[in-house]
Amino acid sequence: MLLACGGSVVTLGPGAAGAAGDAGNPASPPPPRVGGAGACNDPGLTCSGSVSFPTCNGNGSTLVQCTCSAGVWQCPVFSGGIDCPPPQPTCPGPSQVQPNAFCQPSSGLVCPSDIPVVGCDGQPMGYVSCTCPNGNWSCETPGPLCPVDAGGCPPPDSTYAGQGCDYYAGTCGGDPQVCGGQVLYDALQCSAGVWTVVASTACDVDAGAVPDGF
């Protein structure tokens, strides 16, 4: 509400400041000039003025009736405060989002941390997200994302370098080759989702199988 010059209370109505004067009163100056307490020389003349008032998103403006008095435009002034909702919390930097660290409680806030989620190929595929329901960051690390072979290694007769692989912690046999009536295998490791040779075996027809480099 606005308090008029004579002490009466008036209600602000929606409107916007125009560049021209009142259509019904050709003598009216532009509303911004009237609302800005500009000078006037017609005592008692009433014109529309554009005045500002606070809102939760800054200042708004509306048109009110102002009167020329004592050589200046007198307009109602805003009185009273406004109630605005508290601002929504924002996410801090990922390095500050750590399990059990302090945070401002918020039921709907979800923030990224710098804790990587590692894929089956050993490469980061994203970062853990955390919530703050009770004043401390709660971060749920995803469970196992990659299958682990319970029996150790896959069958060596069907495992070859360059093939795709799941996660295997140790060294496995692969790349089968027959040498002197025996089947020999290279040593392979699952690296970045691909079987990679870490030690190869060469077949020497005369001396038998020997590792490369000997």
Image: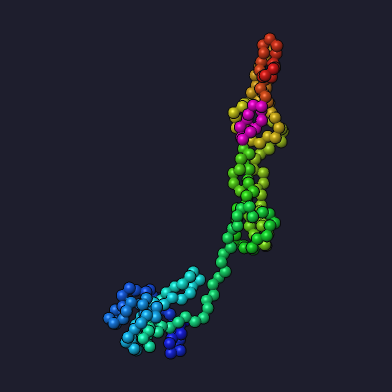
Q: Is residue 98 above or below residue 25?
A: above
Total number of numbered discs in the rendering: 0
Query: Residue 91's image quarter?
Result: bottom right
Principal secondary structure, stretch drawn in magenta: strand
The outermost residue toward the left is 26
Q: Residue at x 48, y 70 (%)?
A: 58
Q: Residue at x 36, y 77 (%)?
A: 33
Work out whether residue 155 can be spotted.
Answer: no
| x then y, percent, for residue 125 | 59, 44
First to last magenta residue range: 188-198
Q: Residue at x 61, y 32 (%)?
A: 194
Quadrant containing the C terminus in the rendered view: top right
Q: Is residue 62 above or below residue 150?
A: below
Does residue 70 belong to the magenta stretch? no
Does residue 191 belong to the magenta stretch? yes
Q: Is residue 62 above or below residue 71?
A: above
The outermost residue toward the top is 206
| x then y, percent, for residue 102 | 68, 60
Front residue of this view, candidates 176 and 15? 15
Q: Residue at x 29, y 79 (%)?
A: 23
Q: Is residue 138 above or below residue 124?
A: below
Front residue of this view, candidates 66 and 116? 66
Work out whether residue 212 can be spotted.
Answer: yes
Front residue of this view, candidates 3 and 30? 30
| x then y, percent, for residue 56 | 50, 71
| x then y, percent, for residue 118 | 63, 43
